[in-house]
Amino acid sequence: MTCKIRKWELSDAADLAAALSNKKVQDNLRDGLPYPYTKQDGNDFITAMLSADKNDTFAFAVTIDDKAIGSIGVFRQDNIHRLTAELGYYIAEEYWGKGIMTEAVKQICEYVFSKSDIIRIYAEPFAYNAASCRVLEKAGFQYEGTLRKNAVKNGKVLDMKIYSLVKEGR
């Protein structure tokens, strides 16, 4: 299965809502997303991503045959970390374990490194999320360490791992 990343379209809102209305997907994401996630929530998110500063926010739909099956974004940090950006992503459960997200991560990193001055992209998956850690490893990210007791999700204190990919030549 070959995926492509592309700019969001308002017509993706229903597909986005379908993917995010799954508790298993949301359990691996940060808090703050509505549950269940509605088409209007999707519209609001897509509108925000399309109007975001193009030099700071690189947000794309992950697609198969032009159908949005997930989301991927790289978000510039600030101050002394202004050349660093955080990566976040998810796909609908039915697409898990097929190598799709690894391909999407490779695509967005190549895009960000070629179209911006960002030199480091990092991600912080929950330590228990072995599949997400594997995505990063297969996409060439380096494991940097474990952030102990770094998050509270669903009432549990959790460790997170940190991975990074740096632009070659800098």
Image (cartoon, rainbow, N blue to C red):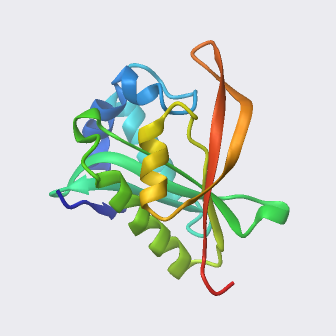
Image coords of residue 146 (percent x, y):
69, 41
Q: How many marks?
A: 0
- Looking at the image, the residue that sits furthest to the top is 155
Which quadrant of the structure image shows residue 55?
Answer: bottom right
Q: Is residue 75 visible?
A: yes
Could you tell whether 95 is left or right of 134 in the image? Answer: left
Q: Quadrant of the C terminus?
A: bottom right
Q: Residue furthest bottom?
A: 169
Q: Is residue 2 above or below residue 15?
A: below
Nearer to the camera, 35 or 27: 27
Q: Position of residue 101 (x, y in %)?
A: 35, 52
User: Picture quarter containing residue 19?
Assistant: top left
Nearer to me, 35 or 118: 118
Q: Residue at x 48, y 34 (%)?
A: 129
Residue located at (49% from left, 68% from top): 109
Up the image or down, 71 lies above or below 108; here it is above
Q: Residue at x 32, y 49 (%)?
A: 10
| Above or below: residue 115 compared with residue 29 | below
Q: Where residue 123 appears, x then y in whole percent?
A: 59, 51
Answer with the quarter of the image where residue 40 lies: top left
Residue situated furthest right in the rendering: 80
Q: Residue at x 84, y 62 (%)?
A: 79
Can see residue 8?
no
Q: Closest to the observer: 156 or 81? A: 156
Quarter of the rendering occupied by the N terminus: bottom left
